[in-house]
Amino acid sequence: MDVTDFPDDLVQTQAAWSATYQALAAPRPRATTALRRRLLLLSVRLWWHPYWETVPSVPAARTELRRLARARRAVQAA
């Protein structure tokens, strides 16, 4: 299995995690409690996703997943 063959739900969860993190990191964010709870929920979903049991190098795959989610978000923003 290629390290870039991520399930769509995993990529979407990573993108949602990144968006939530950015919203929380913004100056004077609103609804910080809701954002923190969402970030925690998304973190659990990312960490325990069944995909990670199939990957030989999990740290490298996690890094690639973050890169892929950022790239897709940049394309969608353009």
Image: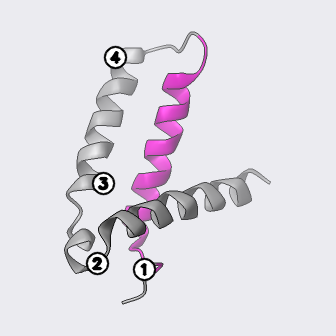
Which of the two labelled residues, at mark 1 and mark 3, occupies the earlier sequence position?
1
First in sequence, mark 2 or 3: give its number.
3
Give the number of the mark in front: 1 or 3.
1
Q: Which mark is residue 55?
A: 2
Give the magenta-colored segment's residue range. 4-27
Q: Position of residue 18 (x, y in %)?
A: 50, 43
In the rendered image, which quarter is residue 71 located in? bottom right
Residue type highlighted by circle 3: Leu
Closer to the chain start, of discs 1 and 4, is 1
Residue on which disc 3 sits: 46
Which of the two discs, 2 and 1, labels the residue nearer the N terminus?
A: 1
The answer to which image quadrant residue 53 occupies is bottom left
Above or below, 75 against 56 in this view is above
Q: Earlier in the sequence, mark 4 or mark 3?
A: 4
Whole-Å distance between the Cαs marked 1 and 3? Answer: 16 Å
Labelled pair 2, 1 in contact (Cβ < 8 Å):
yes
Crowd band around label 2 with a 10 angstrom C-alpha radius: few (<14), some (14–19), many (20+)? some
Which residue is situated farthest in the bottom direction here?
A: 1
Amino acid marked by disc 1:
Val
Q: Pinpoint residue 50: horizontal percent, then vertical percent.
A: 20, 69
Q: Residue at x 28, y 80 (%)?
A: 56
Residue labelled with disc 1: 3
Of 70 and 61, nearer the camera is 61
Q: Residue furthest right?
A: 78
Q: Which residue is mark 4?
A: 33
Q: Is residue 4 above or below residue 33?
A: below
- Please state the horizontal and vertical placement of residue 1, each as a whole percent of the image: 36, 90
